[in-house]
Image: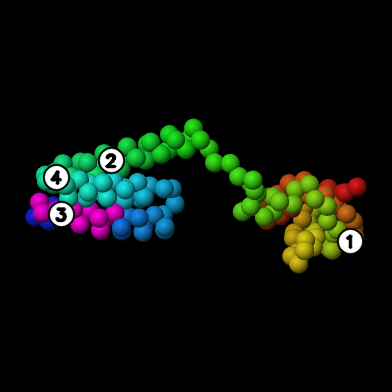
């Protein structure tokens, strides 16, 4: 292994950068991409200036950690906002809306039809045909009360 490390070339770092960038697609958290960028920078540096392998490894680690810390600091100061905060929370989109029960709420649970989908609801006992208003969500269950 030491023999390999002693002969690190610029293209080794660029291959590592490509592999790390590809790994980022399978890993959550935006970590591998910063090490991929770090590897690419070290590879570019080695292409221009001969750098001892020990310094290459140290630069790779330090640059990766600095990039992660800098990105997380930036992300904390500049949070992402969206015009559709409930986009991936389908049930949360229904809070405040009214629907008609297709199955009565008995023993705390019933069903409503929303478009072409049937949703399980939780609430007070109510008969079929009652209008209910969604007040919240518990997983995939809509919390409801009698509507107006």
| Left or right of 119, for residue 66 | left
Q: Do residues under tags 2 and 1 come within 8 Å of each other at their CB atoms?
A: no
Q: Residue 134, position in %: x, y?
A: 78, 49
Q: Which numbered disc flags the more N-terminal residue, 3 or 4?
A: 3
Say which residue appears at 75% left-offset and 48% top-offset: 95
Say which residue appears at 75% left-offset and 59% top-offset: 120
Q: Which numbered disc flags the more N-terminal residue, 3 or 2?
A: 3
How much space separates mark 4 and mark 2, taking CA atoms?
A: 17 Å
Colour scheme in use: rainbow
Q: Do residues under tags 4 and 1 come within 8 Å of each other at their CB atoms?
A: no
Q: Nearer the viewer, residue 42 or 86?
A: 42
Which residue bears the numbered disc 1? 128
How much space separates mark 3 and mark 4, taking CA atoms?
A: 11 Å
How much space separates mark 2 and mark 1, taking CA atoms?
A: 63 Å
How much space separates mark 1 and mark 3, taking CA atoms?
A: 73 Å
Q: Is residue 148 visible?
A: yes
How much space separates mark 3 and mark 2, taking CA atoms?
A: 18 Å
Q: Which numbered disc flags the more N-terminal residue, 1 or 3?
A: 3
SS class of the residue under badge 3? loop
| Range shown magenta | 6-17
Give the quadrant of the N terminus: bottom left
Which residue bears the numbered disc 4? 49
Of tags 1 and 3, the one toward the viewer is 3
Of tags 3 and 4, the one toward the viewer is 4
Which residue bears the numbered disc 2? 63
SS class of the residue under badge 1? loop
How much space separates mark 4 and mark 1, taking CA atoms?
A: 77 Å
Residue 16 magenta? yes
């Amino acid at each position: 292994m030491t023999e390999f490390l002693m002969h690190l070339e610029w293209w080794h770092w660029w291959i590592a950068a490509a592999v790390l960038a590809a790994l980022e697609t399978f890993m959550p958290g935006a970590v591998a991409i910063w090490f991929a960028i770090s590897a690419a920078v070290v590879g570019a540096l080695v292409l221009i200036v001969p750098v001892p392998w020990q310094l290459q490894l140290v630069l790779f680690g330090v640059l990766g950690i600095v990039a992660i810390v800098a990105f997380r600091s930036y992300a904390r100061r500049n949070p992402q906002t969206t015009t559709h905060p409930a986009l991936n929370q389908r049930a949360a989109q229904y809070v405040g809306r009214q629907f008609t029960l297709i199955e009565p709420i008995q023993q705390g649970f019933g069903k409503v039809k929303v478009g072409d989908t049937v949703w399980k609801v939780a609430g007070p006992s109510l008969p079929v045909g009652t209008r209910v208003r969604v007040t919240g969500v518990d997983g995939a269950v809509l919390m409801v009360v009698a509507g107006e």
